[in-house]
Amino acid sequence: MLIAFIAAGLCAAAQVRVIFDTDMGNDVDDALALAILHAFETRGEAKLLAVTVTKDNPYAAVLVDVIDTFYRRGEIPIGMVRNGKTPNDSPMIRVPCERLNPGGSFVYPRRMALGAAPDAVAILRQTLAREEDASVTIVQVGFSTNLARLLDSGADQYSPLSGAQLVARKVRLLVAMAGHFPPAQPEYNVVTDVPSAQKVFAEWPSPVVFSGFEVGAALLYPARSIEHDFSWVRDHPVVDAYRNYMHMPYDRPSWDLTAALYAVRPDAGYFKLSAEGTVRVDEKGNTLFTSLAGGKHRYLILDEAAKARTLEALTLLASQPR
Ligand SMILES: [Ca+2]
């Protein structure tokens, strides 16, 4: 009994407590990354505390809700950006949300009506305020809009602390799919909201690890995994998202998946890490890294020798039965 209690305590202590901040709907890697985070929670390796959305289209939040509900975690708080970037619709988010059974009910149940998600900054503040100090890992795989506004936020009913103080106290690590190392061209997540990226990467209090464009681009998620590995269930919302993003079969870079994988298993040797330094975002959205002892920023470096193992982990986790 005592041993079981201690084991449960150790297991809970080892769980990485994650907030996932996503532009769900602009590319399909966000959906696969969310599936991976659910797999980690099923395995006892992580706890998904909240999901906040930076794509300003209501189907983005509903698809997050659909995926959370599919994994039987429909209680996870979801926050939505207000007046954010990329309000355009996309089939990858809309089609799975709208699929109906012959009787007219949704193929994928959800709890949230279109447009009903609360404000992302409020959800971030509420979630952080509840957590232990220095315990939260944030995985940002879209624009920096929500996190920049979090830094600028003031005291509210959830915490007397400013946003910057709250982050300094509660967040242990930010893992961001952002940038290009070394800089080649401005990366989508950065260039879509340059002022927010400049603010977050200049002012964020915790260590930041970047997964640059080149890492996910070298690890292609295979169409054959979509076609075969998810056959344990008839209808899977992430598979539907994938099939409605581009014409099947296609392989797709695993950008956001790499950030989720590193965030939960930082010591598993999937990637190498740069030296410490600082990343500055210029006005065009380039991410310029300067090596500096004691700097809070590092970036992932693809390890050619670990590539097959890393890709296998990504496909096994994304397709893991709930
Ligand atoms: Ca994304």
Image: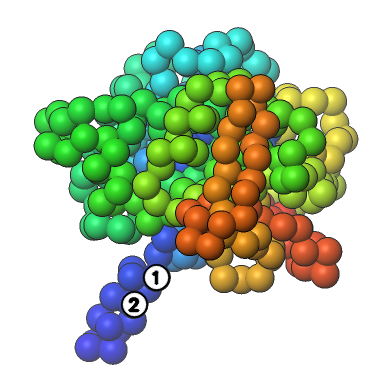
At 24% from the left edge and 42% from the top edge, which residue is drawn? 165
* SS under mark 2: helix
Q: Residue 210, relative to residue 64: is it above or below?
A: below
Q: Secondary structure at mark 1?
A: helix
Residue 183 placement: quadrant: top right
Q: Are marks 2 and 1 in contact (CB under 8 Å)?
A: yes
Which disc, if any, is residue 14?
A: 1
| Residue in the picture at 34% in, 77% down | 10
Relative image position of residue 84 (x, y in whole percent): 47, 15
Residue 262 % position (x, y): 58, 58
Residue of label 2: 10
Q: Position of residue 78 (x, y in %)?
A: 38, 32
Which residue is painted at 39% across and 70% down in the image? 14
- Mark 1 packing: few (<14 Cα in 10 Å), some, or many (20+)? few
Q: Of residues 318 and 194, which is closer to you in this image? A: 194
Q: As rendered, which of 238 and 178 lies closer to the eye? A: 178
Label 2, label 1: how far apart the Cα atoms are: 6 Å
Q: Nearer the viewer, residue 298 or 95?
A: 298
Q: Which amino acid, mark 1? A: Ala
Q: Position of residue 225 (x, y in %)?
A: 78, 49
